[in-house]
Structures are given as C-alpha cells and as structure tokens.
Image: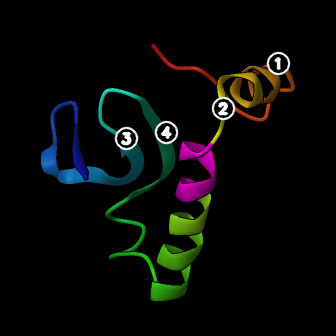
C-alpha cells in the first residue's frame, strides 16, 4: 500500500505492508520510504507473509498479552 506524506503525495511517500482480515484485525507490519528502497525482496515478502499469518491467527488473549508485554502497539 502506498501512503502519501504531507506536501509530497504518493510519489514522495512511503510503502507499507499491512496484514488485514476484513472486519476482524489489521496489523501494520512494515514500512519504508520509497526514496530509501524500491521494493522488498522475495525472501522478505515470504517472511512478512509468515508474520502476518501468525498475527492474524492470534486469539484475543494472545493479543492482550502481546500488547501488555509491549510486543505490539495499538494504534487508533
């Protein structure tokens, strides 16, 4: 997902990787400035997909524990 920065739009923005299960959970997994790198490598994509799968499988109790331990941060 491309995200624009104020005053620069999407061309000068950042790319983000978001794990999403519609009407259930969403996790911001990774982000980088497009000026810093063009894209992610195939091996990085596979690792991020594994992470997303794990996060989306968390039960409510696991989420609460991860939040309490500081392993995840809730963003509103």
Find numbered disc 1 in the image and state the secondary structure of the residue it sits on: helix
Q: CA distance from mark 1 to mark 4?
A: 16 Å
Q: CA distance from mark 4 to mark 2?
A: 14 Å
Q: Which residues are magenta?
A: 52-57
Above or below, comparing residue 23 to residue 32 in the picture:
above
Task: Say which of 34 and 56 sits in front.
Answer: 56
Q: CA distance from mark 2 to mark 3?
A: 13 Å
Disc 4 target residue:
27
Disc 3 target residue:
21
Image side of residue 39 versus residue 28, left or right: left
Numbered mark located on residue 59 in the image: 2
Q: Residue at x 78, y 30 (%)?
A: 66
Q: Quadrant of residue 58?
A: top right
Q: CA distance from mark 1 to mark 3?
A: 22 Å
For label 4, the crowd category at 10 Å Cα-Cα, with few meaning under 14, some 14 to 19 and many 20 or more, is some
Find numbered disc 4 in the image and state the secondary structure of the residue it sits on: strand
């Amino acid at each position: 997902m491309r995200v624009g920065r104020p005053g620069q739009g999407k061309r000068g923005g950042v790319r983000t990787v978001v794990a999403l299960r519609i009407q259930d959970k969403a996790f911001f997994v990774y982000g980088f400035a497009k000026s810093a790198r063009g894209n992610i490598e195939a091996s990085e994509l596979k690792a991020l997909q594994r992470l997303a799968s794990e996060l989306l499988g968390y039960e409510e109790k696991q989420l609460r524990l991860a939040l309490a331990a500081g392993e995840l941060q809730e963003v509103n």
